[in-house]
Image: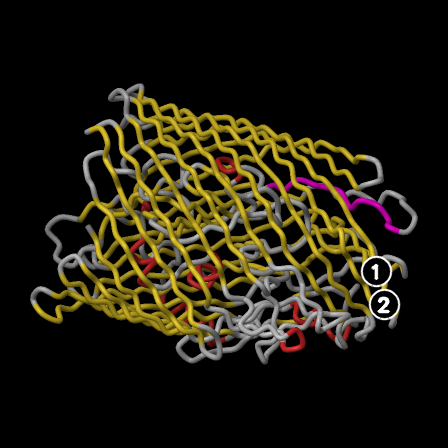
Amino acid sequence: MKLTHINILVFTLVAFSAPCADAQTKAIENEDLALEEIIVTANKREERLIDVPMAITAITGLELEARGIDTIQDLSFAVPGMTMREDGPGSYQIFLRGIANAYGGGALVSIYQDEIPLVLSGYEILPTRVMDLARVEVLKGPQGTLYGQGAVGGAVRYITNRPLLNSFEGSLEANLYNVASGDWGDFITGIANIPVVEDQLAFRIAAEFGNGGGWQDQPEADIEDGNGEDLRNIRFQGLWKPVEPMDVFFTYVNYHADYELGQGYEQPDRTVYVAVDPAHRLIPKIWNYDVYNLEAHYDFGAAELMSSTSYLKMDLQYPFSYYGGPDTVYEGTLSGYSDRYNPGHQFSQELRLSSTDDSPLQWTVGTFYRDVNIETNIPNGVTGYYGEVYYFTYYVTNTSKSYSFFADASYQINDQWNIGAGARYFKDKQTEEYIPNPVQSSTFDSVDPRIYASWTYADNRNVYASITKGFRSGGFNGFDYATGAELPDFDPESLWSYELGYKATILDGALFLDLAAYYTSYNDMLRRGLILVDNAIGLQSFTSNIGKAEIKGLEAGFTWRATDALTLNLSASFIDAEVTQLDAEGSANIEGDPIDYVPEFSLSVGGNYDFNWRSDMPGYIRASYNYRDEMPYVDRTSFPAANVPQYSDKIGLIDARLGLTFGRTYTELYVQNLTNENKYIDPYHAWNNANRTRPRAIGIVFGVTF
């Protein structure tokens, strides 16, 4: 750890867990400057944040808007310790707490909208936007007991505003902005809550439409500002309460996004380079999906039964281009591009029974089933190798049918001590079919426990400890393109995480602190193995279990209401993550290598000042600074030893926003990336596969509520 980083962490002496949290809050009485008491549902039941034995960041919908957080990329900068790899708009992998690995078939972080799982695989995750949300919760550390095998590093939950049964309300908002050295963009967002039958039936509609805002050029193809967005995002919800103990909640989402230049990769001059033929126009990126969910609750008095049934259908079309540049072992001799089409669908069903009384014993039991099918079709692939150009096609279908049973319980021994434990049994049958090769099939299973305890040694001062296990299924490497021989499969990977934390509210409730330290033993880690090259096909590699890694981390943050008008928050993360043991030959790593996509230090600091322009015109000023250290990428099969690790840039982004309200109308002026930083977010730029920070954007918002 660098000395300056130690000084910052010691100075803050606080933990990063939830600068702003949960829409379900209750003011602390008799304290003018007291922060709101925070209620979260991370354990799938309502609890005070200070009582939950895990690190959680929860940001309210209003705070998301004030901080200009719209996409998962924005969220990753606002949450220190959270990073991602993005292959064009809406296609991403999320990493948390040093659990960062671009290889393997499954996700490392689960994504949910309410009770709907949005992750189909490690690479097919439905993009979602910050629209009409109550809050976003980021659960840090393994969440396998309650959220399944895709939550090795944690889980991100988008909690929507549900229909109100007795209130007609809504809003209409226009957002116009300009991107530096790019195009104008606009968003129109509308929200309507419509009660139909008093106390029984209501509907809520939220929709946004966006256009433009691009800044990337492909001059050889006469494309300017080609990554501008054509967006349609519509969410329809219904809430029906036929009898007092029962409610039924329905959600439908229709999402469409279209980008002429859809890779997201760009050069420092904001141009896009297409390998083999720079003048070639790649296919546009088009993201289409539909989500259907039926959620029902029945309250038995001492317990509540929940059923969530979901069906997702996606149709993704995207271009892909790569170039083994001068820094790679290919020294500019290998390049290619392809058209890719990924249709898929997923059905899931969860049944859960949870306690709801005030007894010392709190518990949750449930079962979860998932059936997913994803196709990857490449009808037009082109590879250039040592000056020769080859053409290829590629078709593969992946299926997964899994089920699990889980249980978790905690017991309040006395006023000070609470202990708990849980476990999940998971079984997954996967198949993979490469046309015209045979079908591969395998079954993976795991038992993932956790134990935890908390000690309330004084009012609103808690110490907690937990031990949790995370698990990710194995998978297939397919076949050698040249010979048709089956490549070796890869086994599951797992980890154990040990966490010690402290949460407290002090200064008469005006300051919330949260400290966390953790150690993770990462076993059978998946990484790139031996690379094969065939002149008629191009580049081929396979994934293997290379050995073990260790991760040590500290998190610190606070929220402080300094005056009636001024609230300050800060969060910071330090992570030391490295490969410690190799069990495979021909690996991309050696012992002592850092883990990919893990910054050593990251920081988010911000402040909000409320004021009155006039007695009838309240306003606010919000400013934030997000910093992230460079992130490494190590691959000795692709890079000469002298060129590893590859690194992203160090990044510091400043955002600011000014808002005023007059009656039912409001306006906001904002700037994102105030200093117009132009830096690599991703370390994979030597392969021409890295995105950069978005240029400065200046915008104005006009809105009306009703």
Residue that numbered label 2 is attached to: 385
**Mark 1, secondary structure of its residue:** strand
Labels 1 and 2: the sequence-earlier one:
2
**In terms of depth relative to the viewer, which is nearer, 277 or 245?**
277
Q: Which amino acid does label 1 sit on?
A: Gly
Residue sitting at x 30%, y 53%? 504
One can see residue 632 in this view: no
Question: Mark 1 near mark 2, Cβ–Cβ under 8 Å?
Answer: yes
One can see residue 465 in this view: yes
Q: How many labels does the image show?
A: 2
Q: Which amino acid does label 2 sit on?
A: Tyr
Residue sitting at x 51%, y 54%? 257
* Residue 449 placement: quadrant: top right
Image height of 327 relative to 312, above or below: below
Image height of 499 relative to 636, above or below: above
**In terms of depth relative to the viewer, which is nearer, 199 or 115?**
199
The circle drawn on residue 538 is: 1
Rendered location of residue 691, percent (x, y): 58, 68
Q: Give the range drawn in magenta.
A: 471-481
Image height of 225 relative to 211, above or below: below
Rendered location of residue 576, percent (x, y): 57, 62
Judge from the rendering whether residue 499 lies leftward or rightward of residue 246; answer left or right.
right
Q: Mark 1 and mark 2: span between their CA atoms?
A: 7 Å
Judge from the rendering whether residue 404 lies leftward or rightward of residue 30; answer left or right.
right
* Residue 192 placement: quadrant: top left
Crowd class of label 1 (few under 14; some 14 to 19; many from 20; radius 10 Å): many
Q: Taken as a whole, is the magenta stretch helix, strand or loop?
A: loop
Image height of 554 relative to 6, above or below: above
**In terms of depth relative to the viewer, which is nearer, 1 or 633?**
633
